[in-house]
Amino acid sequence: MPRATDEPETRPETLMESLARSIPQVGRLEWIGLSPERRAALIEPQQAEAREGTGLEGEHHARSGRSKRQVTLIQAEHLEVVGALLGREPIPPGVVRRNLVVRGINLQGLRDRRFRIGEVLLEGTGPCPPCSRMQENLGEGGYHAMRGHGGITARVLEGGVLRIADPVRAEAAPTRPAG
């Protein structure tokens, strides 16, 4: 007969859980884009100040500390895919209106965990699906070409300066007890 206990029952970590927890790749920040106001042309600085709880300095979305969408990120590799789906060259980053373009790390693996870009600590808060503006920016089929390739959203946990060429690294995820 099992003992009654107040401790929750734990089970050993599965291989798939272990693989999902470990992200060995180190990516690179390739592009920064800031929109100073709604529908304004993006500014493309070589560096940007990330502020804890609000987002990127100079970005019009960085006003409230409550948003889970303080920073938007997309993979450079996905800009190439979207271009191919539309029968074009890779899409220029400013057209998709994300804040950061990274290369060499799978953003989907970061969508619900903490990661660093240079000195800045971010936490992925979910996917960044395309909006209807993608049809306007990319032309016929643009919205559907972006589906599944929109990147992720994140919030800033520790601020600092983001610089082009900064490394992008997953923070160590907590492990489950061995049981």
Image: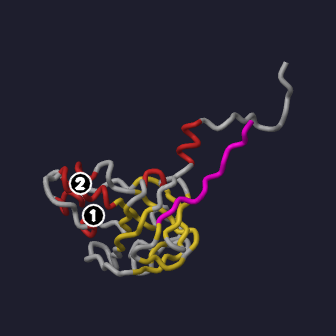
**Which label's residue is closer to the chain start, 1 or 2?**
2
Q: Determine the residue positioned at 34% across, 66% down.
A: 98
Looking at the rendering, the stretch of residues picked out in magenta corresponds to 168-179
Using the image, tell me which numbered label, if any, was put on residue 82.
2
Is 173 one of the magenta-colored residues?
A: yes
Question: Looking at the picture, which amino acid does disc 1 mark?
Answer: Val
Query: In which quadrant of the rendered image does the C terminus lie?
Result: top right
As measured in the structure, the alpha-carbon distance from the residue carrying label 1 to the one carrying label 2 is 10 Å
**Relative to residue 100, is residue 53 drawn left or right?**
right
Instruction: Point out residue 25 in the picture as x, y percentages from the top left corner.
Output: 47, 56
Q: Determine the residue positioned at 57% across, 48% down.
A: 21
Query: Foreground mark, 1 or 2?
Result: 2
The quadrant holding residue 102 is bottom left
State the residue lying farthest toward the top. Answer: 1
Q: Is residue 152 above or below residue 9?
A: below
What secondary structure characterizes most of the magenta part? loop
Q: Determine the residue positioned at 51% across, 54% down.
A: 24
Q: What element carries label 1?
A: helix
Is 136 one of the magenta-colored residues?
A: no
Mark count: 2
